[in-house]
Amino acid sequence: MQALVLAAGVGRRMLPLTDAVPKTLLTVGPSTIIDRIIGGLAHRGVTPITVVTGYRADELRAHLGGRFPDLDVRYVHNSEYDSTNNIHSMALAFEQMDLDDDLVLIESDLVYEEGVLDQLIRSPHLDVALVDRYRTGMDGTVVTLSETGVVTQVIPPHLQMRDFSFADKYKTLNIYRFSAEFCSGPLRELLGQYTRMWGRNAYYELVLGILVYLQQAEVFGEVVQDRWAEVDDPNDLRVAEYEFSPDKRYELLTSAWGGSWTTDVLDFAFIRNTYFPTPAMVSELRHNLPDLLAGYGSRQEVLDEKLSWALAYPVPLVHAVAGASQAYPWLRSWFAGRRVLVPAPTFGEYDRVFPDAARYRDQPGVRWEDVERLGADADVVVFVNPNNPTGTVLPTTTIADYARRHPSTTVVVDESFIDFSDEVSVVQQVSGGGLDNVLVIKSLSKSLGVPGLRLGALVTSDEAMAGRIREATPIWNLSSTAEHFLEIMLKHRVPLERSFHRTAADRELLTQELKASPLVRTVLPSAANFLLVRLTLGAAGADAGARWLVEHRAVFVKDVSTKMADGGGWWRIAVRDAHDIGVLVQAMRDLYEHGLAPRPASGASPALQGST
C-alpha cells in the first residue's frame, strides 16, 4: 500500500502564520502536522509516500529529508501552486506514480489520532472515504450515505446553498483509501480529462462526485470513531492544539476566558442560566438571523426602552450596556482618587478597577458591623449581591437602608445573580425615590443565559450619573441580535421565571451530591447559580485536580483557591442540569480514585480529612 500526500497549497487562510513557513510545517503539540502524517504512514508500513509540493517546496523537502532520512519519500512538484487547486496536484501525481498498489490519499492539513488511520487501513471495503457526522464549525465537502454506508452524493462547498441542510450529511476528512484498479482506471482517466478540458482550479472531490453520480465508483463511508481536526486557519490551529495537547487544555481554557464552543468540554466554570432562552426563542432568532445580520440596531434611547420593558424596570432609570463589563472602565474613571470599599473575595473586575480599595471580608458571610466601620471612611461602597464566588446574599432592605443613611456615599449594587435568590432587586426601592446615590449594575448573561449577546443594565435615579452614562455610551451600543432578543423576551417571562426556580432546584441537587463527594470538605450556602466548595485538597491539589478533570474527563471547574487566601483548595462550580451534575460527580469520583485526593483515615468521615 502506498500513499499520496497533497502539500502544495499556500495556505492563504492561515496567513500571517504561513508567511514564512508552509502550513504543514506548523506545529500542533510537540510535532509538525506533516511529521504526524508521514510518521503515522511509515509506522504502518505504507510506502512509498509521494508528496506533492508547491509553496516553499525546498523547505518542506529539507525538513522531511532530515526528519525521515531512511524513508522512501518521493516528490512531485506543482509549479503552478498559486493559481491551481488540488485537482491539478492530484492529476500531476497520478501522471508520475505507479498506480499498481492500493493508495492512501491524505491532505497535508489534517491532525488525527492513530486510530483514524488504523480504521482506514483495516476497512474491508475496496474504496473508502473517512467521514464524520457533521458538526457546527466544520466546512468543506460533505457527503450523503446510503443505509449500507455507501457514498451516494459528494457535495462540495459551492453547491451548499443558503437553505442547504446539514442534518443528514457527513463531513469528509479528506483521507481516502482507493484500490489500484480504481486509481489506475476511472479516477486517473477522469482527473486527466477534467484538468485538460475544464480547468485546474477545482477540488478533486468534484471528480469523485461525478464518478459516484455516474455509478462508476462505489465508495464506502467509514464513520470515524477517533478524534481529528482539519487545520485551515489560525482558529482551526488553536482548536487542534486543544484537541491534541491534553496537557495544555486547562491553560487554553482559562487564558481564553470563553470561546469554548469549539471544544467538547462540559463547562462548570462559566456561569449562565441553562434553562433560558427557550427552544422557541432560539428558533425565532435563527429564523431572523439573516435579516438581523444585515440590519443596524436602534439608537441608545430605543435600546434603553426595550431593555426596561424586558426587565419590567422603570423606563427613565434604565441604561442598556454591552454586558456589565462595559461599565467597569467607566467606574474606574468616574471614581478615580475616591475612597472605595469592596467585598473580599469578589468578582475580579472590582479588584482590577479599584486596586487600592479597602475591603470588608466575606468569610463567607458578611459582618455588617465591618461594613459600617470601614464604610465610614469611604466615598464609594460596593455590594455584590449575591457575591461571587461565595454566593453570600445580603438583605436588599439592609442595603437600601444603608444607602439612605449615607446619602453622600455612592452605593454600587451588583445584582447579576439576584434572580436566583429569594431577595428582590433593589431597583424597586430605587424607583420609589430617595436612593439617588445608588447605582445598580446587572450582567444579564447569568440570568438570561445569553453571554454571547453581551447584555447588561445600569439603573440609577441620579440624573448626573445618568448623564455620565449617556455621554460614555455609543449611539449603537448593542447588536441587532441582542436588540431582537430583548423584543422576543416579552413573550417568555413565564418560562424565564420558571427557569430561576428550576435552577434553584438543581442548586440543591448539586449541593447534596457534592456533600457526598470524598473530595469535598464543605459546600457553602449559595443564593446564586453557583456553589463555592472547599475541598479536602490544598490549593496545589485543587489546581492539579481542575487540570486533571479537563484533561481526562472534559469537565471544567473554576479553581478560586487564590481568591480565598487561606491555603485551602476551593472550587466555584456553576449550576447545571441533573444530567450534567451526574457527569461532574462521576468525574470527581474518578479523580478521587485516581489518587490526587488524600484518603480518609479508617473510620473517619471523608469530609473532615485532607490537607489545607
Image (cartoon, helix red, strand yellow):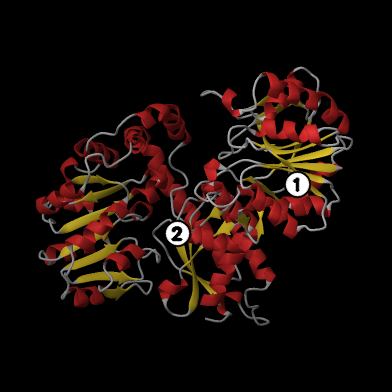
> On the image, which quarter does residue 184 sit in?
top right
Q: Which residue is mark 2?
A: 530
User: Which quadrant holds the N terminus?
Assistant: top right
Q: Which mark is residue 116?
A: 1
How many marks the image carries: the answer is 2
Name the residue type under label 2: Phe
Residue 587 seen in the figure:
no
Residue 81, position as x, y percentages in the image: 62, 37
Above or below residue 288? Residue 112 is below
> On the image, which quarter does residue 54 sit in?
top right
In the foreground, 561 or 74: 74
Residue at (17% x, 70% y) in the render: 337
In the foreground, 201 or 539: 201
Classify residue 288 as left or right of residue 175: left
Secondary structure, mark 2, is strand
Residue 486, position as x, y percentages in the image: 32, 37
Secondary structure, mark 1, is helix
Classify residue 440 as left or right of residue 13: left
Name the residue type under label 1: Val
The CA span between labels 1 and 2 is 39 Å
Above or below residue 400? Residue 21 is above
Q: Determine contact: label 1, label 2, CB under 8 Å.
A: no
Classify residue 501 as left or right of residue 340: right
Residue 599, position as x, y percentages in the image: 65, 78
Task: Mark 1 vs mark 2: give the one in front.
Answer: 1
For the residue carrying disc 1, how many other residues have a C-alpha within 10 Å: few (<14), some (14-19), or many (20+)?
many
Nearer-N-terminus badge (1/2): 1
